[in-house]
Amino acid sequence: MIHLSPAHALRLATLVALPLVSSGARGDQALRPVPLVARVTDVQPMTGIVLWTTNPAAATAPIQLEFAYLAYRDVVDARGDYDWTPVERLLADVAGRGHQAIIRWHDTYVGKPSGIPDSIRNLPGYRETTARSEGKKTAFPDWSHPRLGPFVLDFFTRFAERFDADPRLAFVQVGFGLWSEYHIYDGPLRLGETFPSHMFQADFARHLAKHLAQTPWMISVDAAGDQAPFASDAELRALRFGVFDDSFNHARHREENQPNWEVFGRDRWKTAPAGGEFAFFEKVDQKEALADGGPHGVPFAEQAARFHVSFIIGDDQPRFRPPERIRAAGLACGYRFRVTRFDASQARSEITITNTGIAPLYHAAFPAVNGMRAERSLAGLLPGESRSFMIPAGGTEPVLTIESDRLVPGQRIGYDADLP
């Protein structure tokens, strides 16, 4: 047995203990609160008031989204060849303004030829119906032809392959009938002829659910009517699609439109986006859409919260309201994040974020410290709920951001914070 003097024993104990203390300090430093003050002042990506891509005000208005109609014939020529240049050009223009696009594909538009390409229209036995709708000569597709349905399904297969993960595209709207709003309220509505059969509509919905895995797709709330199969088919309603309402604020919305929302489930917004457009029934629907009391006694922010909308098309609003009012209305839509905890050590950070908005974010976005992302996403975080994250990055001055691969250059997801 080796005997050590008290002095030697103390020196040896110190040498042994020092590395243990140093190692512990590097590996598991105590977390400390990080002061953080921030405020969301800009409309958040994928939310807010929406202008058409053709509106000159889109370049300067406080918006994040732009809307465009596209027809199948814009992409497919008379030989059946696909050329996606019009879509690419549109998305590039929108992204160049720091925004994302909402595209609605249509087959029937008042006063126009049908959106079906000549490669289908020129087939033997294909017979379109031309009739007046809203006083204008309008072409209605021949849904009885055996090649039209397969063409539409193939079209969306190819569209999804090319654009489903494209950050320039926020949402896709689809449907049939006038403006793809699932109705022909003025004109020849004949299921299986001027309007697709219930069977094909069901196949179409299942097809989109299968192929558009990343970009949320939406249909009109008017699809709750008898001309569509959704009201009587719980399996179809269970598909993950959003809904839009193109008469969002008209005088009889509660009596006429709200029941359609209820058919699709008032909790649908928790998993898929809700949106729409200000109505055109009366001049006040547009002119007073963002007035303090709204056009019919309901303020926009109240109506938006009631239906948990992420966006509303309001192309005329720059004519009626100043930019700050449009910005405020946009901030009343969709998600809004607040950081309620930010603690960090040299090696890691712990963060808690609450959604103080009226809807979740429907694309993946990640808290990041010094550029290192959390493993969990903020997508799907419901209003009033919080989510905590641990990120293996910290330091003396850690920087917290929210990052997403579904943003275009110039976009930023912000947050509120008031942490002393």
Image (spheres, helix red, strand yellow):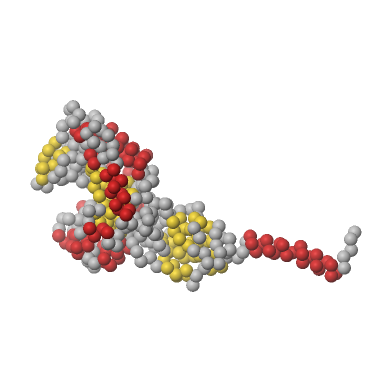
Q: Nearer the viewer, residue 240 or 264?
A: 240
* Residue 293 left/right relative to 211: left
Among all residues in the image, which is located at the extreme left?
135
The residue shown at (68%, 61%) is: 23
- The percent position of residue 53, horizontal first and vertical second, equals 25, 53
The residue shown at (56%, 64%) is: 395
Among all residues in the image, which is located at the extreme top?
124
Q: How many marks?
A: 0
Q: Which of 370 and 299 is in front in this view?
A: 370
Q: Is residue 419 visible?
A: yes
The part of the image, by quadrant, that contains residue 25 is: bottom right
The residue shown at (37%, 56%) is: 409
The residue shown at (39%, 59%) is: 412
Which quarter of the rendered picture does the N terminus lie within?
bottom right
Rendered view: 65 above or below 136: below
Rendered view: 378 above or below 40: above
The part of the image, by quadrant, that contains residue 118 is: top left
- The percent position of residue 45, horizontal first and vertical second, equals 35, 57
Q: Nearer the viewer, residue 390 or 79?
A: 79
Rendered view: 298 above or below 186: below
Q: Is residue 314 visible?
A: no
- The percent position of residue 69, horizontal first and vertical second, equals 24, 47
